[in-house]
Amino acid sequence: MATVQTELIPNYVAGRWHTPSGRDALDVVNPATGETLARVPLSSAEDVDKVVQGAVAAFDGWRRTPPTERIQYLFKLKQLLEENFEEIARTITLEAGKTMGESRGELRRGIENVEVATGIPSMMMGYNVEDIATGIDEMMIRQPLGVVAAIVPFNFPCMIPLWFLPYAIACGNCFVLKPSERVPLSMRKVVALLEKTGLPPGVVSLVNGAKEAVDALLDHPEVRAISFVGSSPVARYIYERSARAGKRVQCQGGAKNPTVIMPDADMDMSLKLIMDSAFGCAGQRCLATSVAVPIGEAQKTFTPMLLEAARSRKVGFGLDPGVELGPVITPQSRERIAGLVDRGVAEGGKVLVDGRQARVTGYEKGNFVGATVLELPQAGGELARTEIFGPVLSVTNAANLDAAIEAVNASAFGNMACIFTSSGAAARKFRYEARVGNVGVNIGTPAPMAFFPFSGWKGSFFGDLHAQGKDAIEFYTDKKIVVERWPKEWSRQF
Ligand code: NAD
């Protein structure tokens, strides 16, 4: 069992841990046990201003620090993350409810971004052409923006901040993180490790809070760019408000992810991968398969196997061995998920496996929902288009691949879609025609590696440059064009 603490989590301002006093605070609760782990202050606009001013003061010195030196802090951070790997993974499990395997996986994907960002001296190179006119040269150089901020969701407390932080600072920016108020503990640990690297004060700052803190970041004239990951309505709001304030902005939103199972698919492999995708992290992943679309004969082979596997998925506290499915984040989330399953039934759906009454002995206060499978009569129904964000897999049959692709493309979201097949032609058609940002072919959860952008289309993304990889360099730098003449001879006649 976790130890009960009610410490108020401090902000990290100009290299010092500072607890904003006299602010409202929220409990940070272990979703499996109901225990209060800590309290998180709801920072005000004034608190945010202090944080941003600390970052502004650090910027000039940091941008003048050579990139080869800047990345030394990332090498040290990588080392410290490895040394503290188990402890951070455990913190993720305590605050977010994941199994230890899932928390370790999340942290590993986060560390990969630190590794990739150590390549910044090459990645942020510009280009040049000599003699655009005789004796005149032109070059493009990249410069950091200044103070940049990220606002992140609860479902990957560590990995998602690391989609941004390493690239932002390696490019020479000062970075402000606003963690999710539900899971502020693991990034607090990561920032404490960054402090140990000797990173200059103000290069990375932490401001805890919710809407007031977010709005203050969006409106602050010294914040040049905003990265956001979270639900689509908030993503749209943040995109619009930041753009109005003249900021560079990238907002990743929600998802509803279909996976097509062709009759010629390897059913054992497909089942295993789809189970992990749908029910891993209790379905609280923006790349979770949320709709299975078996085609033709696959309805007779895949679906019965799916029901059997879903019934045996072991629910419990993520620190306990053998647990495959942890709790959802809050009791409200649990209620919302149950309500959406009811809505599916009202739309003519049928609950084939019902996890809504899941209880775990010894963890009576946990927000558990067991693996749930809901058959929906039509791909275009309202629930098939609504993000549930829980361990609920809908099944909607489709007559053929064309009908399945039509359903994929009718969705307001465009985060991911997968196909399981042994036909190259079917796979290529799907890859070519599906209007989504991440496609999996015989892959359950096509999460891009750190050196690729994390894409997302339609209502799943607002902006143009994505997180990670080369897009991160584009996002975190301004391009400057310099045209130079040094020779004394004139290259043109006047
Ligand atoms: P959320 O939108 O409720 O919160 C995300 C962040 O926004 C938090 O830091 C929160 O404090 C802040 N916030 C919330 N409401 C706000 C408001 N009205 N004004 C200003 N700030 C506000 O999301 P969540 O519940 O934490 O996370 C789950 C959502 O995130 C799901 O929709 C999921 O699909 C999405 N998500 C998307 C991706 C992706 O890459 N596309 C990745 C992970 C999660």
Image (cartoon, rainbow, N blue to C red):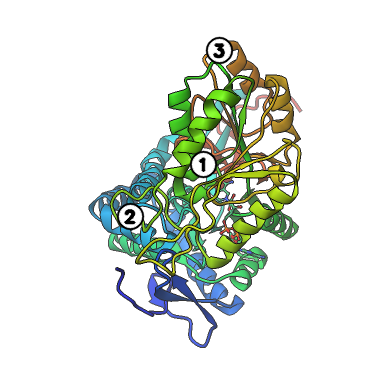
Residue at which label 1 appears: 278
Q: Is mark 1 within 8 Å of ligand 1?
A: no
x and y percentages locating residue 87 in the rendered image: 28, 59
Residue at which label 2 appears: 89
Residues at marks 1 and 3, CA–CA distance in whole angstroms: 23 Å
Residue positioned 69% across, 23% down in the render: 433
Mark 1 or mark 2, whichever is nearer to me = 1
Left or right side of 315 for 130: right
* Quadrant position of the C terminus in the picture: top right
Q: Is mark 2 within 8 Å of ligand 1?
A: no
First reached walking from the N terminus: tag 1 or tag 3: 1
* Quadrant position of the N terminus in the picture: bottom left
Residues at marks 1 and 2, CA–CA distance in whole angstroms: 21 Å
Q: Amino acid at mark 3?
A: Ser
The residue nearer to you, when weighing 337 against 300, is: 300
Residue positioned 59% across, 71% down in the render: 213
Q: Residues within 10 Å of mark 2 (few under 14, many from 20)?
A: many
- Whether residue 469 is visible, yes or no, is no
Residue at which label 3 appears: 423
x and y percentages locating residue 300 in the rendered image: 57, 24
Q: Amino acid at mark 2?
A: Ala
At mark 2, the secondary structure is: helix
Q: Amino acid at mark 1?
A: Ala
